[in-house]
Image: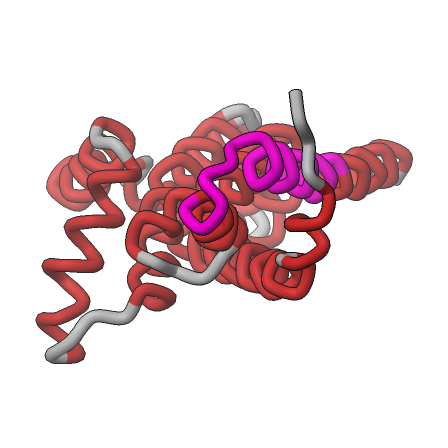
């Protein structure tokens, strides 16, 4: 295998830009996806089935269709409806956030339902409303149990951000494909971004593991 480091150095600055955009996309998707996922998760476990139904449909649709297709539909279909044009970065953030929210909603639902119902009843007996008991009693306890699956979802998000290259969002895979097209080389661009993604995911995994251990000792 003939591996040319020269062209990697030539693209070093572009890869740095790609790393920043990849991190930016992932952070936006994590924040928006977590907030939306919490709301959807709470909606799905609502006692009123009419309220819970649209949330269940949302989860089924976004978990049952490929993220690749969702990115294309949002980029070429939904974003132009609001901006009269399309924007790769906005489309990528929206698609990643909406997709992540469906999976995170299930994580929140499972975490909340893992807490004994007596905890909610105890809060209500102290005069708390349902929302207060959920906020101060149930969610803090369930959050510790949700750290591992949430961490896995965040790692998946970093890797899934590479799909944004298909709509020309200037993240890592975009520049890897650019290098491949210019030099007609495969090993250099794709092995390089593979190593970069590995470093990013291992770094996040390290901090999540530290957080999980810290919460267990509290």
Tell me the residue at 68%/31% (across/down). 3
User: Farthest residue toward the top?
Assistant: 1
Tell me the residue at 38%/50% (across/down). 165
Tell me the residue at 57%/44% (across/down). 139
Q: Measuring from the top left, give residue 149's x and y in whole percent.
A: 58, 29
- In magenta segment, residue 194: yes
On the rendered structure, is 69 left or right of 215? left
Tell me the residue at 40%/32% (across/down). 106
Pick whichever, 168 or 92, lies toward us.
168
Q: From this viewpoint, is residue 83 visible?
A: yes
Q: Is residue 204 above or below residue 213?
A: below
User: Which residues lie in the magenta part?
Assistant: 181-202
Q: Quadrant of the N terminus?
A: top right
Magenta region, main secondary structure:
helix
- In magenta segment, residue 201: yes
On the rendered structure, is 60 left or right of 118? left
Q: Quadrant of the C terminus?
A: top right
User: Farthest residue toward the right?
Assistant: 217
On the rendered structure, is 97 left or right of 3? left
State the image quarter where residue 155 is shown: top right
Q: How many numbered dots are placed on residues in this image?
A: 0
Q: Measuring from the top left, give residue 108's x and y in whole percent.
A: 47, 37
Q: From this viewpoint, is residue 48 visible?
A: no
């Amino acid at each position: 295998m003939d591996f040319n480091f020269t062209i990697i150095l030539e693209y070093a600055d572009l890869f740095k830009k790609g790393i920043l955009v990849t991190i930016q996309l992932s952070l936006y998707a994590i924040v928006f996806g977590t907030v939306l996922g919490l709301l959807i998760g709470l909606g799905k476990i609502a006692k009123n089935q009419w309220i819970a139904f649209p949330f269940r449909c949302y989860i089924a649709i976004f978990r049952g269709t490929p993220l690749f297709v969702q990115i294309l539909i949002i980029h070429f279909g939904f974003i132009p409806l609001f901006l009269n044009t399309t924007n790769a970065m906005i489309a990528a953030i929206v698609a990643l956030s909406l997709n992540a929210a469906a999976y995170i909603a299930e994580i929140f639902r499972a975490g909340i339902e893992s807490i004994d119902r007596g905890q909610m009843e105890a809060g209500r007996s102290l005069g708390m409303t349902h929302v207060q008991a959920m906020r101060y009693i149930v969610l803090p306890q369930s959050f510790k149990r949700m750290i591992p699956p949430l961490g896995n979802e965040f790692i998946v998000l970093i890797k899934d951000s590479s799909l944004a290259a298909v709509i020309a969002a200037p993240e890592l895979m975009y520049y890897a494909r650019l290098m491949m097209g210019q030099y007609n080389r495969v090993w250099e661009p794709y092995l390089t971004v593979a190593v970069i993604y590995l470093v990013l995911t291992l770094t996040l995994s390290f901090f999540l593991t530290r957080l999980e251990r810290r919460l267990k000792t509290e």
